[in-house]
Image (spheres, rainbow, N blue to C red):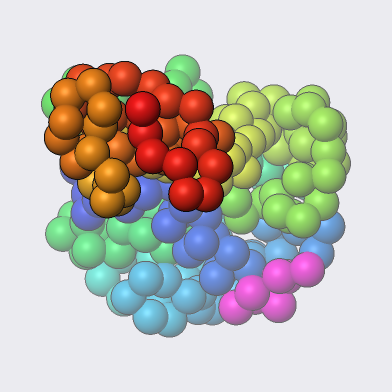
């Protein structure tokens, strides 16, 4: 019995994409501009977050998955990704949605083995999967698989040179929706260092404004008394002298002169 979504171990989007890149590299596809997920039909095992595990990508009749574009299960000995014949044909023809569907199910295979071994069946609904409001994105099996699918199919170095999600979609052969999600996430990560610097600068300015002011050093008084108040509180101010006690200001006098 399958459901639309499951609560799984928390993963941030960059961590999910990192796992997708690890799977690409384990398959020898790390530097490929465009990958063909149907090559996995010959694979007998794949890398997962729990190590390498037996795997099968299986095409089934459309009648077996009438409302789903893909389904990932565990049959007791291996991870099985099933896709209906219509999706395989579309993926063979280069259709972005179909290619992304296979990569999406690979996300479940790679990330959610524990849940699969507990008996969960993880489908991709043709009408779109519904996620309960109590499942946050970073703990949602469907959200993680969605991020994984784009990370698996898209070459980061190439995509970051492109100017729009539409270009990413065409170049990587993914759905426009997947390309938009990927493009927005990568742009946010690229802008984060600059935002952090701005926040740090503002914090430094606030700390400087709130810091206690350092008291000015006490002036050094001359030995002569003030002729106005008689106190020995005269100190130099530029070319003049000032009395700290009565604020009287005197012109600078010549050597040997006394304050009058």
Horizontally, residue 144 falls left or right of residue 101, namely left
* Residue 42 among those drawn in magenta: no
Region of the chain picked out in magenta, as a range:
25-31
Note whether residue 190 is visible. yes
Q: Give above or below for 11 relative to 163.
A: below
- Secondary structure, magenta segment, majority class: loop
Residue closer to the observer: 200 or 17: 200
**Pick the front one: 69 or 158:** 158
Number of numbered markers: 0
Near-viewer residue (97 or 201): 201
Q: Quadrant of the N terminus?
A: top left
- Residue 54 seen in the figure: no
| Left/right of residue 150 with respect to residue 226 in the rendered view | right
Relative horizontal placement of residue 158, taking residue 231 as reference (left or right): right
Q: Quadrant of residue 87?
A: top right
Pinpoint residue 184: horizontal percent, then vertical percent: 60, 30
């Amino acid at each position: 019995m399958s459901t639309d979504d499951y609560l799984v171990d928390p993963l941030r989007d960059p961590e999910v994409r990192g796992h997708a890149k690890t799977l690409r590299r384990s398959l020898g596809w790390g530097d490929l501009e465009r990958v063909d997920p149907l090559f996995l039909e010959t694979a007998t095992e794949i890398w997962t977050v729990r190590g390498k595990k037996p795997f099968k990508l299986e095409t089934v009749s459309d009648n077996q998955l009438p409302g789903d574009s893909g389904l990932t299960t565990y049959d007791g000995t291996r991870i099985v990704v099933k896709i209906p014949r219509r999706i395989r044909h579309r993926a063979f023809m280069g259709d972005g949605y179909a290619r992304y569907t296979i990569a999406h199910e690979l996300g479940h295979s790679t990330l959610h083995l524990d849940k699969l071994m507990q008996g969960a069946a993880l489908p991709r609904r043709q009408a779109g999967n519904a996620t309960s409001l109590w499942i946050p994105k970073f703990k949602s099996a469907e959200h993680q698989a969605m991020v994984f699918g784009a990370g698996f199919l898209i070459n980061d170095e190439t995509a970051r040179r492109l100017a729009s999600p539409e270009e990413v979609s065409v170049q990587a052969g993914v759905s426009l929706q997947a390309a938009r999600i990927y493009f927005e996430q990568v742009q946010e990560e690229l802008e984060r260092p600059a935002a952090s610097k701005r926040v740090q600068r503002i914090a430094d300015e606030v700390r400087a404004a709130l810091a206690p002011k350092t008291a000015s050093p006490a002036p050094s008084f001359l030995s002569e008394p003030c002729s106005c108040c008689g106190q020995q509180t005269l100190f130099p101010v530029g070319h003049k002298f000032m009395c700290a006690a009565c604020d009287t200001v005197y012109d600078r006098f010549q050597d040997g002169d006394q304050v009058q």
